[in-house]
Image (cartoon, grey):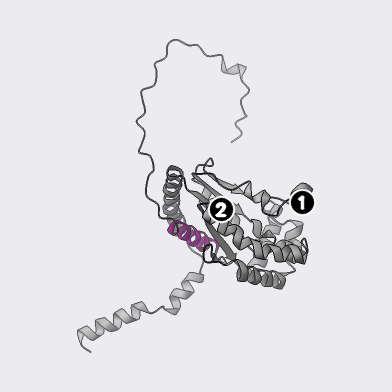
């Protein structure tokens, strides 16, 4: 074989996806590499937040998916290094009787961002197409109205210069069950298993049907759904954050290091004795 043909064959082989590469993506990402990549992405998130703040953008990111799909984990990593004054999480509980009588989207509108803010919805108005639909908390008329009005509501937000991004975290039946079992075994995470989660666990197929119908009506051009393969938590977090960063054309506007002035000299002030204060016992 000629040298040129050998090089061409080698390049062609490199371009083809290999089975072992696909297999590697299913493997658990090593902690060291995960943390290294996460640090890089979190630095970019700081740049993005500063860009949004200085340019007065309004960003809404919706996180939806099955219970235990990993939504909370990625939200935690996104906000970990950001300023909570400009990036906040909205995780609403069960609506009150008064809220139930309101226009359905009303209680969510109150949490939308002002200029320079990023709002992350840990579940959102899509509750109506998911848990409310499956568990029978809304009637057919209310459900049908949601599917009609939701796309128009989101288009209205976009026309109001809100950047709307929607993520669906997809997890397999087997992986969800494994995570439920682990949560149940650990006293520090058992609170995550609400009575609603336990009931929902039995309705895998019903939730699949509800999700497919929801996508059919709300996967619109102006605000498409982005599906995150979430069976591998570490990979899902990195992939989601990387994708989020790619959707907004930002530049680095982070402040330069501040020049710290000299501290004032002691002018003879005598502080009260430490014995007058109640110190926390140092048991560690």
Nearer-N-terminus badge (1/2) = 2
Give the dominant element type of the magenta stretch: helix, strand or loop: helix
Name the residue tied to disc 1.
101
Which of the image's four quarters has the N terminus? bottom left
Task: Tell whether position 191 is magenta.
Answer: no
Residue 27 appears left or right of 64: left
Mark 2, Cα crowd under 10 Å, few <14 / some 14-19 / many 20+, is: many
- Residue found 44% across the figure and 10% down from its top: 268
Residue 152 versus residue 239: which sits nearer the camera?
A: 152
Percent position (x, y) of residue 278? Answer: 63, 23
Instruction: Identify the magenta region.
Output: 233-246
Percent position (x, y) of residue 152? Answer: 60, 61
For residue 18, which quarter of the picture? bottom left
Mark 1, Cα crowd under 10 Å, few <14 / some 14-19 / many 20+, is: few
Give SS at disc 1: loop
Name the residue tied to disc 2.
75
Between circles 1 and 2, the one closer to the viewer is 1
Give SS at disc 2: helix
Whether residue 261 is visible to the viewer of this picture, yes or no, is: yes
Percent position (x, y) of residue 189? Answer: 67, 53
Task: Tell whether position 236 is magenta.
Answer: yes
Residue 138 appears left or right of 32: right
Instruction: Work out how far the residue at label 1 is from the one at label 2, CA to CA, in angstroms.
Output: 30 Å
Residue 10 appears left or right of 214: left
Up-down: is 77 above or below 23? above
- Name the residue at the bottom extreme: 1
Which of the image's four quarters has the C terminus? top right
Up-down: is 282 above or below 142? above
Up-down: is 262 above or below 213? above
- Residue found 68% across the figure and 55% down from its top: 186
Residue 193 versus residue 101: which sits nearer the camera?
A: 101
- Residue found 62% across the figure and 69% down from its top: 217
């Amino acid at each position: 074989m000629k040298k040129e043909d050998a090089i061409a064959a080698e390049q062609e082989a490199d371009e083809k996806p290999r089975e072992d590469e696909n297999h590697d993506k299913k493997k658990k990402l090593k902690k060291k590499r995960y943390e290294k990549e996460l640090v890089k992405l979190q630095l970019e998130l700081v740049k993005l937040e500063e860009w949004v703040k200085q340019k007065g953008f309004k960003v809404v990111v919706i996180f939806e998916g099955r219970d235990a799909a990993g939504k909370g984990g990625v939200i935690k990593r996104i906000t970990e290094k950001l300023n909570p004054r400009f990036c906040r999480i909205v995780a609403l509980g069960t609506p009150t009787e008064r809220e139930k009588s309101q226009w359905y989207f009303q209680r969510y509108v109150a949490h939308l961002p002002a200029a320079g803010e990023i709002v992350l919805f840990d579940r959102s108005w899509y509750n109506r197409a998911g848990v409310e639909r499956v568990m029978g908390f809304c009637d057919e008329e209310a459900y049908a109205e949601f599917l009609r009005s939701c796309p128009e509501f989101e288009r209205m937000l976009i026309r109001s210069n809100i950047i709307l991004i929607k993520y669906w975290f997809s997890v397999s039946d087997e992986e969800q069950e494994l995570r439920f079992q682990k949560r149940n075994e650990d006293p520090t995470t058992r609170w995550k298993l609400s009575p609603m989660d336990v009931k929902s666990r039995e309705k895998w197929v019903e939730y699949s049907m509800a999700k497919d119908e929801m996508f059919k009506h709300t996967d619109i051009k102006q605000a498409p759904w982005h599906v995150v393969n979430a069976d591998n938590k570490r990979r899902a977090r990195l992939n989601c954050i990387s994708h989020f960063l790619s959707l907004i054309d930002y530049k680095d506007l982070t402040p330069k290091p501040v020049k710290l002035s000299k501290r004032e000299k002691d002018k003879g002030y005598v502080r009260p004795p430490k014995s007058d204060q109640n110190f926390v016992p140092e048991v560690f």
